[in-house]
Image (cartoon, grey):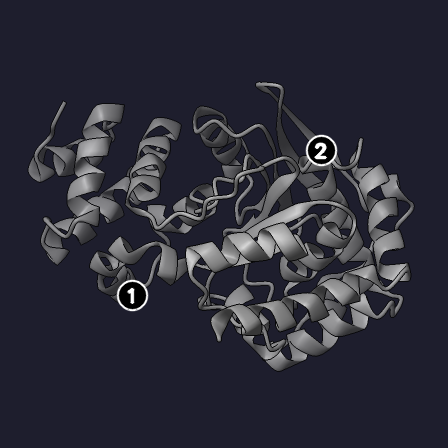
Amino acid sequence: MSITPQEALQRTIEHREIFHDEMLHLMRMVMSGELSPVMTAAIITGLRVKKETIGEITAAAQVMREFSTKVHVPDSTHLVDIVGTGGDGANTFNISTCSMFVAAAAGAKVSKHGGRGVSSKSGSADVMEALGIHINLTPEAIAQCIAEVGIGFMFAPNHHPAMKNVAPVRRELGVRTIFNILGPLTNPAGAPNILMGVFHPDLVGIQVRALQRLGAEHALVVYGRDGMDEVSLGAATLVGELKNGQITEYEIHPEDFGLSMSSNRALKVDTPEQSREMLIGVLKGEPGAAQDIVCLNAGAALYAANVASSIADGLQKARAAIASGAALARLEQLVTRTHALAA
């Protein structure tokens, strides 16, 4: 079923839903550059004002996946994405990127999908480069990294070339749009398991239901009540979990895992280089809030990847991966391997 851009815009003005097949048609026009920048801006702003529905988000994510450059991973057992929507304004070091090395060392395979910092001082791609990792690899080379090192980093602009049609509009608008929540739903390796952080409590229920419709197997969507798009140490964390086709929503607290509550002030950074230093400190086993929050998030990722039986079990596995030196070794292996594959 098709819809004209004008009809779609009228729907958003009247706070009415754009149905699934209509949204597929509309998003294909947006992603292929068929719509003018004015109409694209009007529609994505209208969707934001009326609030995007789960159906609209799911359809838009399907189209983004359709237009993406994919990474083929033959064995997706224990394959997980650790990703955040960003936009939490916390400016902490790259917790999910650090968690990736720990989770891989503890038995998960991580296909991380990320880009440069937009609202943060250091995006995942920024800190990966600061660590000496080559981020511009072919899809085949990324698949090889996942097979050999247990980690593959997919630099978002390389995998979503059609986004060039909306990038100038997004940049000029300067406000959050549906695209801020689509990125984490469109892993180019098709990771069936995911730990996703979101910037607003309402998105917990929305994103976990979108993941359910998109065919995810085990997903944890989290929002720290202190505003963090991670499992937080500074407050309770709201969790939406998809497992065996069923969704449950609950809250977890640092104390549940024997961790003391602490503000994220000690985790703040101003540059990718500062984030790199903090990340390496964690992997080297330096105790403190940074290691605690990484182990908590890596533990949640290990649970999502079905490597651990619970977040608490994952936390213990994460601690062991750091203590043994295995997590730091994964970082060193990834640096070496990405450069060899890029040569």
* Quarter where residue 222 is shown: top right
Element at label 1? helix
Query: Where is residue 286 drawn, in percent x and y?
Result: 87, 70
Query: Where is residue 4 drawn, in percent x and y?
Result: 8, 34
* Quarter where residue 15 is shown: top left
**Residue drawn at the location 11% of the way across and 30% of the way down:** 3
Residue 171 got which mark? 1
Under mark 2, the amino acid is Asn
Query: Where is residue 177 drawn, in percent x and y?
Result: 34, 50
- Visible in this render: residue 303? yes
Q: Please indicate whether residue 153 sits to the left or right of residue 68 in the image.
A: right
* Quarter where residue 321 is shown: bottom right
Mark 1 surroundings within 10 Å by alpha-carbon count, few (fewer than 14), some (14 through 19), many (20 or more): few
Under mark 1, the amino acid is Arg
> Observer-nearest residue: 249 or 272?
272
Q: Is residue 65 above or below residue 165?
A: above
Q: Which residue is mark 2?
A: 306
Query: Where is residue 240 drawn, in percent x and y?
Result: 61, 31
Element at label 2? loop
CA gap between label 2 and label 1 equals 38 Å
Q: Please indicate whether residue 149 sits to the left or right of residue 319 in the image.
A: left
**Residue drawn at the location 36% of the way across and 35% of the way down:** 57
**Residue drawn at the location 59% of the way across and 52% of the way down:** 146
Mark 2 surroundings within 10 Å by alpha-carbon count, few (fewer than 14), some (14 through 19), many (20 or more): some
Q: Quadrant of the N terminus?
A: top left
